[in-house]
Amino acid sequence: GSLGPMGQRLAHEVHNFIKHRCDELGDPDPKVGRLSFIGHSAGSMIVRTALTSPVLRPYLPKLHAFVSLSSSHCGNVYVPSTLVAGGMWALQHLHQSTFMDELQLVDRDKHEDCFMYRRH
């Protein structure tokens, strides 16, 4: 999958959870309720993408914390380890995932046009 749709799905899921189970987060007063996210690896990049979604914009004043663990927020353009580079190549070819192209900043012809560069 691609980070864009994964982030949108997460944004909608968080919005629906708040709407149905956490009414206090819908209060416009930023002092009422707090919203925090913890992400690991690719999950952190999905959270960052979700946080840029217009769906979550009303809740951003309530954002308390975003903890990111072991995430490649700038992508993996230069991988010094041949073992890691080989593993990434295998994942990319086995899963045919757009995500791996986005992570390596090869989803567009120019780096400036890549998802990771534009979005984050």
Image (cartoon, helix red, strand yellow):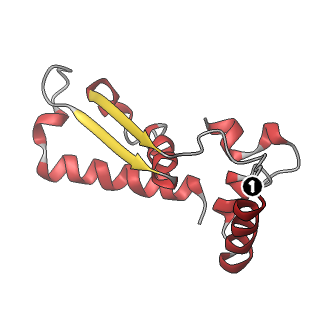
Q: How many marks?
A: 1
On the image, the x and y values in percent for residue 65 come to 31, 31
Q: Toward the viewer: 65 or 114?
A: 65
Check the image and report above or below for 27 versus 117.
above
Q: Residue at x 39, y 42 (%)?
A: 55
For label 1, count other residues whose C-alpha is less than 10 Å away and answer few (under 14), some (14-19) or many (20+).
Answer: few
Indicate left or right for 42 with 66 as reference.
Answer: right
What's the residue at 59%, 45% (across, down)? 72
Identify residue type, mark 1. Answer: Ser
Residue 56's image quarter? top left
For the N terminus, the image quarter is bottom right
Q: Up-down: is 17 above or below 116? A: below
Residue 22's x, y, as percent? 13, 44
For label 1, the residue is 81
At which x and y percent is residue 29?
A: 17, 20
Residue under the image location 30 percent in, 29 percent down = 63
